[in-house]
Amino acid sequence: WEALLARPFRNARQTEYRLQWSIGKATGDRQPKRSRAQALSPIGPRFGSYFSVNRVELNTMNHEPQTSIGRSYYDNVGTTLEIGKSYPMTITAELGNGGQGDVNRVRVWADWNFDSVFSDNELVLSRVVNFADYNSNKEITFTESITVPSSAASGKKIGLRVLGHYVKGDEGDSACGEVDSGNRADYGITITGVGTPTCDDGIQNGDETGIDCGGSCEP
């Protein structure tokens, strides 16, 4: 059991605190392996009700995450991607109570190698959003292509993190850490196909039958 107490977030009328209980199992494949980035991320931004991602579309996944919530983990929402293929990813975000001078950003990471860390080189999408980009409903929708690398961990359910946030300093440059305002949505993505093994990364991937051994990594 892990209890995480959020820092306060404010809107024009109130200050709230959120307590979230995270329940995990030591063994079993009932849910995707959680990354340390997920575990260490704060539950809430400093301020709520501002810029947020409100729809995520990828392959068969079409989901509306909670807005102005620091991090939500959707265990039962995800899709399947095949190694070597490219997929359009469509993101819709809303301005919320943000102002005309606000600069916001959407960023997406995929834990391709299933090492429990959203590394900087696993950033698959980054889009800056300015006030002029919104439609009459104060929303923006854009699509970018994501390619599953040959080194992705086939047969695993990897983590996918979508972050929408207000740009302040270097906040949001990494997948974890506090942001001024925004939301994070975490999903489980199943990887299929046969990729290229990496025989010295300490992970069983590609066609390896063990960690860095077997298959193309014989002996």
Image (cartoon, rainbow, N blue to C red):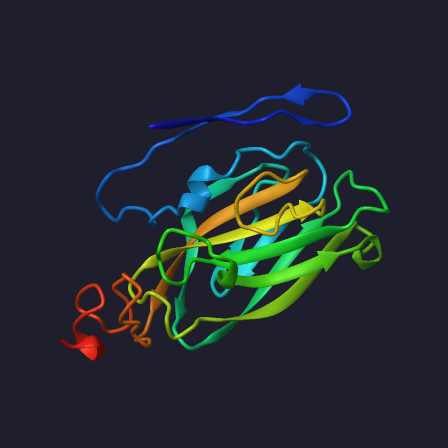
**Residue 74 visible in image:** no
Residue positioned 55% across, 59% down in the render: 57
| Residue 166 screen position, x and y as percent | 71, 45
Residue positioned 50% across, 63% down in the render: 121
| Residue 12 screen position, x and y as percent | 78, 25
29 shown above or below 4 = below
Residue positioned 79% across, 50% down in the render: 137
**Residue 123 visible in image:** yes
Q: Quadrant of residue 99?
A: top right
- Whether residue 170 sits left or right of residue 134 in the image: it is left
Q: Quadrant of the N terminus?
A: top left
| Residue 164 screen position, x and y as percent | 64, 49
178 shown above or below 53 = above
Residue positioned 67% across, 60% down in the render: 127
Q: Quadrant of residue 177?
A: top right
- Whether residue 218 sits left or right of residue 149 in the image: it is left
Q: How many marks?
A: 0
Q: Quadrant of the C terminus?
A: bottom left
| Residue 36 screen position, x and y as percent | 40, 44
Q: Residue reaching furthest left?
A: 219
Observer-nearest residue: 137 or 119? 119
Observer-nearest residue: 71 or 206? 206
Observer-nearest residue: 29 or 117? 117
- Whether residue 141 sits left or right of residue 173 in the image: it is right
